[in-house]
Image: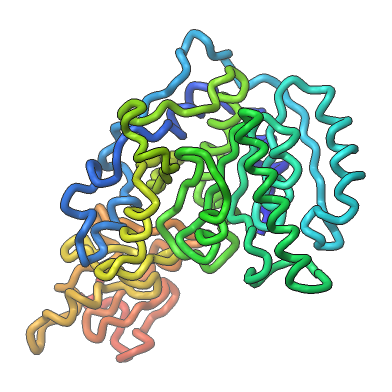
Amino acid sequence: GEPEWLGLLRGLSDSGSPSQALSSYPVPSQHLADFLGSRMESRDGSRFAAMWQSGVDLAPPGEAIVATERLPDVIPDFDVLCVCDGRMRWYAEDAPELEQALSTVCARYKKKLFLGASMGGFGALLHGAKLADAVVAFGPQTLLNQAILRPPASDVAALEGLAGRVHDAVAVAKVRGARVEVHCAADTHLEHALALPLADLALTVHPLCPRTPFARLMERAGVLWPIVAGTMVRLMVDELAPPSPGGAAAAEAGEARVCVAKWEDGRCSRYWLSKEAMVSYFFGEHAPRLPRPGDWFCTRCSERNMKSQFFCNTCARQLQAGEHWSRASNAAEPGTCRVADRVFFLRRGDWGCGACGNTNQGRDRRCSGCRSNWDDTRHVF
């Protein structure tokens, strides 16, 4: 589930702009309900579609917390150490020796950032919480006694003990003043993230249920770069802790709040809310199904459609007898909100059959559903 970290960091070193990094990953300063308005409680897909808009409402939800004059022209040079656990022991095997080796390396540097995804995220939390100034973990498994992917262990008690170690490590990081951030999708990894004693606004939930490794999808969608680059810049200028949105009184009785992410082109914005409100937003009684990568939202009815569907199913059901499918909303309409995917199913030249509603590839000369010719005027390209 790991992205290509070296390629990402090399690109950051070659073309990284500190000001761009901060503007691409601003601190959260607005409540999600203030941003969504009535869509917060909507039963259609509009509550999620708004988190995938691109090119609309680009006003930043949070301002950079670092003055521009304090920033260098480019991100300074940095070293990278890659650690791989080939035995799949969740970086817990020979832990004292590994921690000593990492400590020796870290002692040479003023600033340290630990990154990891899935098992690597667990390792980053386990060791980075004690050694690093900042840790960013993507979709880590922490409830090892119930995780689908987990290290080998003699019994359940051993798994619970290892899970307790990473829990304690995160607590130690809070005492040290180290910044620990966890990013996860709204799937089973969210339960793992909520089990950690994270600080206020340290958990960001991304509004999708991915089929593929989460961090790798973020890399392909161009969202991983802003998160890593923004964290590195704030680490350089000692501004890791985000200001409390709305002032100190905004935090509800000391309960750590969470963030919901909005993906845009090369930008990851965040909006804050309480844990209870977040659970209701994603999984409440009237919440629609979470989108998957490649899904799209109808511009007319806001309902979600699978990426393999060219026409909106909801709009198509409202067509009168004899009406062509081309009268229904389709994925090619301008302004359509589409959930990021590694490869979009609909490409230039693909077309929807106006006679039967079937989706066809650009190379198809006849509809695979009703066998009508590709040049029929009812079709939509």
Residue 280 higher or lower than 69, as above or below: below
Query: Residue 282's spot in the image, x, y percent?
Result: 35, 61
Nearest the viewer among 207 and 188 is 188
Query: Residue 315's spot in the image, x, y percent?
Result: 17, 74
Q: Quadrant of residue 308?
A: bottom left
Nearest the viewer among 306 and 206 is 206
Q: Residue at x 43, y 66 (%)?
A: 292
Nearest the viewer among 230 and 175 is 175
Residue 141 higher or lower than 116, as above or below: below
| Identity of the residue furthest to the left in this view | 320
Q: Residue at x 25, y 53 (%)?
A: 335
Query: Residue 130's spot in the image, x, y percent?
Result: 73, 36
Mark yes or no: residue 3 visible. no
Q: Is residue 309 left or right of residue 294?
A: left
Q: Is residue 109 left or right of residue 205?
A: right
User: Total number of numbered labels?
Assistant: 0
Q: Is residue 6 left or right of residue 264?
A: right
| Identity of the residue furthest to the front in this view | 253
From the image, which quarter does the C terminus lie in? bottom left
Q: Residue at x 73, y 50 (%)?
A: 123
